[in-house]
Image: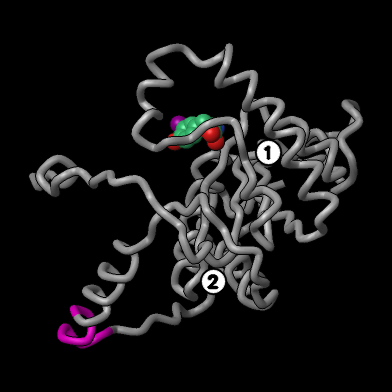
Amino acid sequence: MREPPRYLPLEFERLPEDEARRRSDEFLSRIAKRRTVRDFSDEPVPWDLVRNAIRAAATAPSGANRQPWRFVVVSDPAIKREIRRAAEAEEKESYERRMPEEWLEALAPLGTDWHKPFLETAPYLIVVFKMDFEPAAGGVDDGTAVRKKNYYASESVGIACGFLLAALHFCGLATLTHTPSPMGFLNRILGRPPHEKPYLVIPVGHPAPDARVPDISRKPENEVLIRV
Ligand code: IYR
């Protein structure tokens, strides 16, 4: 059944150009300072900051407005430990056997390895799940239920994660985009149904006092921006 559109007047703030430029410069200078952090402090973080950032992420545009995301927030130390154990087992296998030399070479400047202490140290882990479809009744997909298809789920969840990282950075929190591979263990540990596919693990917290980041650079503007 085709549901007809319903409309509302757009709420939109038209900015004077000088104010637009001021905000543009401010946003750029703040976001350009974001770095992926791997050395976290165990200092606690106010829950409302994390919650608000997820609320911001959940405003992202999505294919057919299906909002095909779930954000599972882990702070329980026992569950974080379980996630670390499972992630390190997969990562050890990946670094020692699965990754081809070319991939290991690409990662070498980042200094990463299979040890993932941040999965326990960071006060929060946001585990993002993507749904390519949902059981129509909103229940568990047992293989027979009618499925409601989502559209552009990867793009939609990627955009939502961009909002999430920006929102967390904006309120002064450090983040890491971590993708243990494969990450099916997250469904088991977090009790999520099979139609929710793990997409990204985002440790959130304050950096450790002695945190270091790799000395890497961003591409020059002429390699990323083309005007025609
Ligand atoms: N998932 C692994 C490997 C890794 C892969 C990429 I691509 C990176 O940019 C960084 C790490 C890990 O987390 O170590």
Residue located 70% across and 74% down the image: 47
Q: CA distance from mark 1 to mark 2?
A: 34 Å
Looking at the rendering, the stretch of residues picked out in magenta corresponds to 15-21
Q: Does 1 lie within the magenta span?
A: no
Q: Does 16 lie within the magenta span?
A: yes
Residue located 57% across and 16% down the image: 96
Q: Considering only order in the chain, which callout, 2 or 1, is on the residue closer to the N terminus?
A: 2
Question: Where residue 128 sits: x, y (%)?
Answer: 65, 48
Q: Is residue 138 left or right of residue 171?
A: right
Q: Does residue 59 sit above or below 197 in this rendering?
A: below
Among the 4 quarters of the image, the one containing residue 10:
bottom left
Between residue 60 and residue 111, name the one nearer to us.
111
Magenta stretch: helix, strand or loop mostly: helix
Residue located 54% across and 71% down the image: 7
- Image coloring type: one colour
Q: Does residue 200 sit above or below 36 in this rendering?
A: above
Q: Secondary structure at mark 2?
A: loop
Instruction: Tell us which disc is closer to us: 1 or 2.
Output: 1
Judged from this view, the residue extending furthest toward the front is 210
Question: Where residue 202 sits: x, y (%)?
Answer: 59, 51
The kind of residue on which mark 2 rests is: Tyr
Report which residue position mark 2 lands on: 7
Q: Is residue 113 left or right of residue 31?
A: right
Report which residue position mark 1 lands on: 198
The kind of residue on which mark 1 rests is: Pro
Q: Secondary structure at mark 1?
A: strand
- Whether the residues at callouts 1 and 2 have beta carbons within 8 Å, the answer is no
Question: Where residue 25 sits: x, y (%)?
Answer: 21, 74
Disc sitting over residue 15 in the figure:
none
User: How busy is the neighbourhood of tag 2: few (under 14 within 10 Å), some, or many (20 plus)?
Assistant: few
Residue located 27% across and 76% down the image: 26
